[in-house]
Amino acid sequence: MLTSLRYLAGTAGPSGFGSRSTAEEATAGAGDLRHVTAIITGATSGIGAETARVLAKRGARLVIPARSLKAAEDARARLRGECPGADVVVLPLDLSSLASVRRFVASFLDLGLPLNLLINNAGKYADRFAVSEDGVEMTFATNYLGHFLLTRLLLEKMAETARETGVEGRIVNVSSTIHSWFAGDDAVGYLDRVTRRKIPYDPTKAYALSKLANVLHTRALADRLREMNANVTANCVHPGIVRTRLIRDRDGLITNTVFFLASKLLKTIPQAAATTCYVAVHPAVAGVSGKYFADCNEASPSRLGASSEEAAKLWSFSENITAEKIQKMMSVHVSAGGFRLQVQNSNADRGMALA
């Protein structure tokens, strides 16, 4: 009850910020960011676009990946309109495709740019069951697996940049409090059953699973960064509930009524982007890694989200499923959790991902 009242009132937490703080307010103490190069997925609209705007306003160089290059070019034009001289690079990326992720990373590395900040923000909510070209349920493939591979392939560049510049690198995974809606103790096993159509597809549970995976990824990633002795941190954020395009795509009487009744609980987009921006650049978060943040303050994830065992199992599964040796039309057997994936190549089973 006390937490809810603080949220509604916008009461500041230990960080000095709260649920009503905006991204511009949360980055005021970060100073000039012209030394920062950031990749932000999902930066063409919603929370990602506001995150990009605020960081560009502070001087950061931005790399905007997107499935739609037109949307990315439009985003760049908007950024340069508000921030003349903003350094914005646009590159193609479809997060639901592991091959596309590899092409994006190769293209980025060819640019010879440093990399200080990676914000894994893009998200998708699939109403209907679909699998990616790699045979993975589409929501999980887009929200988590593509980001997992993207992060893994960029880790050395981030560690190298941190060594050469002395500036701490930061990875921010955007999750959601909805991760706690996933009920069960076997995330990988559930994905297996859904993918093989052994159980009915539930879009909300699939979304919750992908957001839980973001939390678990952060926990395991922080451990590996420490093992690498890399001056790079990894943290996870819940931006808050905001009516972005992901929700507006499901407009209807019930959705509109629910959001009208819950309007006092909603954040504006500038408020929703605050926690991401705070964790990405605020000096107070220096050295903090493997944590979950909400309203610009450390918070607690779900019991399953805090499980080191589940995080290790998901990491092992993810490394196996993203291995380059995996080809279409082959059966994949992964020891972690007993996952068995039949990779399909049917156009009818494919969906489109939103980047």
Image: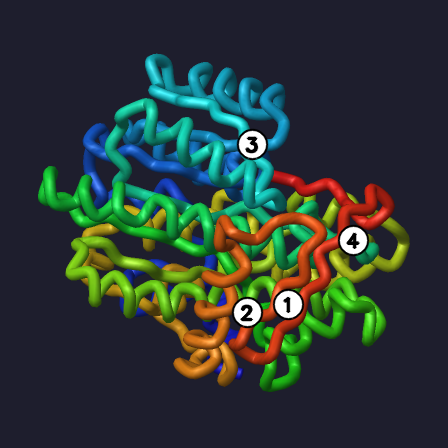
What residue do we see at 65% from left, 82% from top? 183
Number of on-image labels: 4
Say which amino acid is labelled 4: Ala
Instruction: Measure how far apart labels 1 and 3 are at the Cα level.
Output: 23 Å
Picture quadrant where residue 24 is located: top left
Instruction: Measure how far apart labels 1 and 4 are at the Cα level.
Output: 16 Å
Disc 4 target residue: 130
Residue 101 percent location from the top left of the image: 51, 40
* Foreground tag (3 vs 4): 4
Seen from the viewer's position, the closer of residues 196 and 237 is 196
What residue do we see at 30% from left, 65% from top? 222
Residue 115 as seen in the image, left or right of residue 220: left
Instruction: Measure how far apart labels 3 and 4 are at the Cα level.
Output: 20 Å
Q: Are marks 2 and 1 in contact (CB under 8 Å)?
A: yes
- Mark 2: few/some/many CA within 10 Å (<14, 14-19, 20+): many
Q: Determine which of the numbered discs, if any, sits on residue 66 in the image.
A: 3
Q: Determine which of the numbered discs, if any, sits on residue 279 in the image.
A: none
Give whichever of discs 3 and 4 has the lower sequence position: 3
Disc 1 target residue: 208
Residue 13 as seen in the image, left or right of residue 73: left
Disc 2 target residue: 212
Say which amino acid is labelled 3: Ala
Q: Are marks 1 and 4 in contact (CB under 8 Å)?
A: no
Q: Are marks 1 and 3 in contact (CB under 8 Å)?
A: no
Give whichever of discs 1 and 3 has the lower sequence position: 3
Say which amino acid is labelled 2: Leu
Give whichever of discs 1 and 4 has the lower sequence position: 4
